[in-house]
Amino acid sequence: MTRLTEHHRRHIIELLEQGQDLPLDYKHLLFPPERQEYELVYAGKEREEDILAETMAVPLQPVKTFGGNGDNGWHNMLIFGDNLQAMKTLLQWKEEGRLVNADGSRGVKLVYIDPPFGTGDEYGPGNGEMSYSAKVQGAKFISFLRKRLVFIRELLADTGSVFVRLDYHFGHYVKVVMDEVFGEQNFRNEIIINRVMRSLRGLTRFNVSVESLYFYTKTSNYYFHNPEALRKCYYCGAEKEPEWLDMVSPGLRNPPERVIFGKRYLPRRGRHFTFTQERIDVLEREGRIRINPDVSYYDLNGNRVDGRPEYLQTESVPIDNNWTDIKGYAFSTGYPTENSEELLERVIVTASEKGDIVLDAFAGSGTTLAVAEKLGRRWIGIDCGKLAIYTIQKRMLNLREGIGNKGKRLQPKPFTLYNAGLYDFSQLKRLPWEDWRFFALHLFQCRDEPHTVGGVELDGYRGADDVLVFNHLQHGGVVLDYGFIDDLHNQIGGKVGARFFIIAPAASVTFLEDYIDKDRTRYYILRIPYSIINELHSRDFEAITQPVDESQVNETVEAVGFDFIRLPEVGCDYWIKPRKGELINEAVIHIKTFKSKAMVKGATQKGNRETLSMVMVDYDYDGEVFALDGVFYAADIEKNDWEVHLPLEQLGRRAMIIYIDIYGNEYREIKTPADFKPVGAEDEAQGATDA
């Protein structure tokens, strides 16, 4: 643990004398956390205080709103980006009172997550038996998930709950982590649910047929509604009619007697009546009590009683922690590991009420969001995969009111798609100054606190250091050059600390240095869109990466920082060819060129087509909303000689094609059936021209 050094003491005294706030990372020096009675120790484990303080919040940039004005100004939220950084921003929203549940509590009432299970390096001999070895992956996955659980705890309302779905690989580890994060006293249940049933033979272990849901609450004062299900046979699972049962249980109670239909009864020896007198009175009124004349017994006093008191079971019973009566997975969207709507219905009904906010930070196919909407809840979904975002977008616009997506079409409530960490710089440049200033401050985690130093109006603080947002919109084409730094230093030099930050668009900065030293002050230039320099952060900024084949869809991914949308370079031929081995023609896209233009480390070293993640197609684009009909992964496209084959008979008047690089940037184009030419047509046309 880092200890308070003499350097720290002098710096703290200096800041206090200047009336400045202490940096957040001093919190754990002055107030070290209490040690846990027990905890899970693993490589690279970070302190909760550091996770909360050092995670970078990223502004949410609206991309498109679907639907009308929303309910009281609220729009449901679909966020593309790293959920850790997005949740840091949502935590700020909670503190500002922008996330409020039906009962007036701030925060999110329910969080459901089905995170990737950390099993990315499974290997097997080919007969279905997996030999698992993931020590490094395991520590990385646990660290990855623990960070997010810390933010989930902070985001939850005091009456909120969290459900985490895991399998046998890491469930036991994560259970210990959740005891640490939420407190073991707030553990409620381990719920057993179905996974995909497998009946593989030749294994050296049993087939795995179940997974677990870990149910925790924020506090002991939480919302809970125990749903009920029709009574079923414990052994066969078939529904069964309620039965008349003897109304006694083992053991003695005082007083032993009960009055039933106006007559005093005693239970038989060694037994007591199961229900209180008040409960018996209620059951009488409900017609669920009878005296069975065919059964006699001897009571506590040894007297024979003709006619045994009995009660009728209810038709339904409270659901326990065995949820294997419903599906765990579904396959309606084609998205891998799609949770079933029946499962999410039970979770949402259990832990939230209408109007509450439900969050899924690994939104995947969007089951949580779809069911939340059907049940009258508000929702926030976050995912770092473009496939997930487009799958959810299509799903939310084509809902049916019944669970399992059955019944009548459901008019979707308004929702907004946001980018978090990947921004359209062309939109930002059009922002008015106040909006641009707000974006710039929050992008670099600065406090929005205008103040004046040496007659210069500054915009806020980064930790304890002053921050200026360079106004690139001023008339006269002002640029940030050496002269600007000189003039600024002449006014504020000696009045600011050792570090001073200037946030500016990269295009407005005329020099290459990341900082300039003037006397005892170092002026850092935080360029937009370039990454913050390594001296300020312990690791380089990275981009969220997109999968190149289906097996990578649920891999753990984590981004640090941000990037700006840059269109990839794409060049294609469009042909009509006979389908292999058939007489039916199909439309073929031959990808000749694909190069990412992302401003991330390593991107410029990639060769042609190496940065392609996938191609998505809407066969019949309506001009408004991209409705995902097909997805083609780069690994499969490469195996097919860089060709994408489309069913010609399904192409409408125009198709939208989206090419996505591994950093999430998109290149979109619209093609009509006429744009696809018979093979050789281009050569014939060229030959005629040459002649």
Image: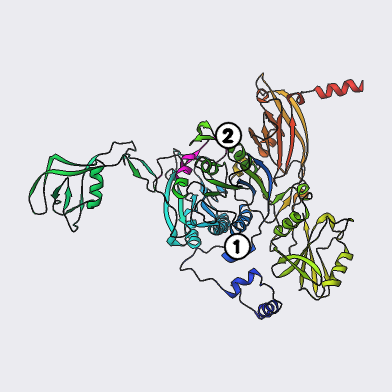
Q: Which image quarter: residue 411?
A: top right
Task: State which region is magenta.
Answer: 322-346
Q: Which image quarter holds the C terminus?
A: top right
Q: Amino acid at mark 2?
A: Asn
Which residue appears at 54% of the width and 56% of the height? 106
**Position of residue 384 in the picture relative to residue 450 (left or right):** left
Asked if residue 24 shows in the view, the reply is yes
- Which mark is on residue 225? none
| Residue 114, above or below 330 | below
Give SS at disc 1. Answer: helix
Residue 288, horizontal then vertical, whole percent: 24, 41
- Spatial CA distance of label 2 from label 1 is 37 Å
Please tell me whether the stretch drawn in magenta is mainly helix, strand or loop.
loop
**Position of residue 114 in the picture relative to residue 73 (left or right):** left
Read off the residue under disc 2: 398
Give SS at disc 2. Answer: loop
Q: Amino acid at mark 1?
A: Leu
Asked if residue 115 shows in the view, the reply is no
Q: Which image quarter: residue 59?
A: bottom right
Which residue appears at 56% of the width and 46% of the height? 379
**Position of residue 492 in the picture relative to residue 188 (left or right):** right
Task: Give the image's coloring scheme.
Answer: rainbow
Which residue appears at 73% of the width and 43% of the height? 610
Q: Looking at the image, is mark 2 or mark 1 nearer the viewer?
A: 2
Residue 263, horizontal then vertical, whole percent: 13, 47
Read off the residue under disc 1: 52
Between 429 and 82, the one lying in front of the other is 429
Residue 414, horizontal then vertical, whole percent: 61, 41
**Position of residue 326 in the picture relative to residue 133 (left or right):** left
Magenta region includes residue 327:
yes
Residue 520, horizontal then vertical, whole percent: 80, 75
